[in-house]
Amino acid sequence: MTETEIKTLIENQRNFFHTGDTFPVKKRIEKLRKLKTAVLQHETEINEALKKDLGKSAFESYMCETGLVLSELTHMLHHVREYAERQDVPTPMAQFAAHSYKKPVPYGVVLIMSPWNYPLLLSLDPLIDAIAAGNTVILKPSAFSPATTAVVKAILAECFDPSYVAVVEGGREENTALLSERFDYIFFTGSQHVGREVMTKAAVHLTPVTLELGGKSPCIVDRRCNLKLAARRIVFGKLLNCGQTCVAPDYIYCDRKIRDKLVRQIIRQINRQYTTEPLKNPDYGKIINEKHFRRLLGLINKEKVAAGGNYNEETLQIEPTVLDNVIFEDAVMQEEIFGPLLPIVTYDSIDEAIEKINSMAHPLAVYVFTSRGRLANKVMERCDFGGGCINDTLVHLATSEMGFGGFGESGMGAYHGEEGFRTFTHYKSIVNKKTWPDLSIRYQPYTPKNEKKLRKFLK
């Protein structure tokens, strides 16, 4: 799409928004219902596209993408009327007689930029929240997942006119053109590097943003935990989508005393869940493209491979690879991995682990496995991160009842459920003042008598 076409698209959406047609909650619900029906009708095409782009099985596609999209739609259909209601608040005596309330209104024209790793979920989830809040949306998917983008575009075309919801395909040129325009809100999911660029461009127009980024999310394993269960759930969270998940456990940070036992359990779980030949497992996915494939291979120190390490250049697959005796200075610890490599580093005390984690860029997630409630609470309270789990991985994002978002370098803002509705909503604070009585206390001339009255009201 050319720069001129993008300008025209934004202008058309702004004109449509100003007609007020997106404001009635009844119409929002109609659109969300239509979208839910379309997603269900296109499930087969969605599965085929995700298989082509990322090698995902139908089971994983539903569990991690389609099912979660449907869940968010169901939540919004049940709650959007409640979320869109005017919220009455108390009026202070100094404002007598008046009625005060907060009025939720949509921002306007929203830009949603989505990534390639969960191309259906991370395109439609924020879009659902934005539509529920009454906005129009321009969706810019990643160029790296073209098959899924084609299905998403077809689904949205069935449900919305382009003046309401439109998909802009393309790469850097289209991204640059979009970010040069004025939007009323920008929602971006992707890397920290691009996130900084998005925020810089948004600042030109003072456009509010939500940034869902990533980071090196640690998985702390205490010496007092169910090691077998911990290994099972860590392997699940790490290798889902071949590790190409923003909240995947980036590395294990375990008590030195249990490292050897944990490594053995991790290897057993990899073999159990993915077989001893994972590259032949039809349900094991692939790396998105050759660039990322080569980057991941460059992070593997063969001298530290405890399991895995093999790969298939033709299919862009890398075995689940456990790296032992890793230190924070190693290459694999210098960037977010975003692949099926699992480094293991150790600590001597939980205080040491917390201090080290907090000395690094804030991660998107922190996970802790322990049977000690006090230790778990200490980690959850003192570590700086977006969200996380105690004795599990990933599942904190699989709900519409809690907001999901980053903290510091891992992002800002949140979405899902009510938090998602609030993200795409401006709350106008309104005082409806009665025309009587009109107290003279606030008007000049100021007198000692009126000042005395004023001090009774404002204290």
Image: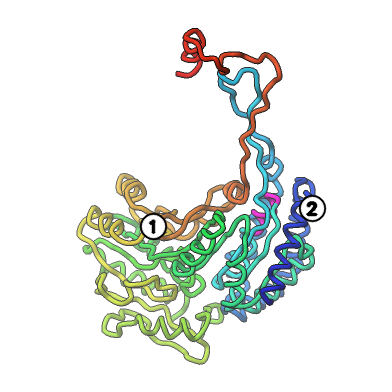
Range drawn in magenta: 127-134
Q: Is residue 262 left or right of residue 248?
A: left
Tell me if residue 269 can be seen. yes
Where is residue 377 shown, x and y percent of the image? Answer: 34, 46
Residue under the point 56% across and 70% down:
115
Which secondary structure, mark 1?
strand
Decide which of tag 2 and tag 1 comes sooner along the chain.
2
- State if disc 1 and disc 2 touch (CB < 8 Å): no
- Examine the rendered structure and indicate whether residue 429 appears above or below residue 358: above
List the single residue furthest toward the front.
445
Badge number at residue 432: none
List the single residue furthest toward the bottom.
314
Q: Is residue 301 left or right of residue 411?
A: left
Q: Which residue is mark 2?
A: 30
Where is residue 213 shown, x and y percent of the image? Answer: 47, 63
Residue under the point 40% across and 73% down:
337
Badge 1: residue crowd in 10 Å (few <14, some 14–19, many ≥20): many
458 vs 417, nearest the viewer: 458
Q: Which residue is mark 1?
A: 366
Quadrant the N terminus occupies: bottom right
Q: Does the magenta stretch mainly form a helix, a strand or a loop?
A: helix
Tell me if residue 93 can be seen. no
Where is residue 392 shown, x and y percent of the image? Answer: 43, 57
Q: Is residue 279 left or right of residue 171?
A: left
Badge 2: residue crowd in 10 Å (few <14, some 14–19, many ≥20): few
List the single residue furthest toward the left.
348
List the single residue furthest toward the top.
449
Residue under the point 55% across and 63% down:
188
Residue under the point 66% across and 74% down:
3
The disc labelled 1 sits on which kind of residue?
Val
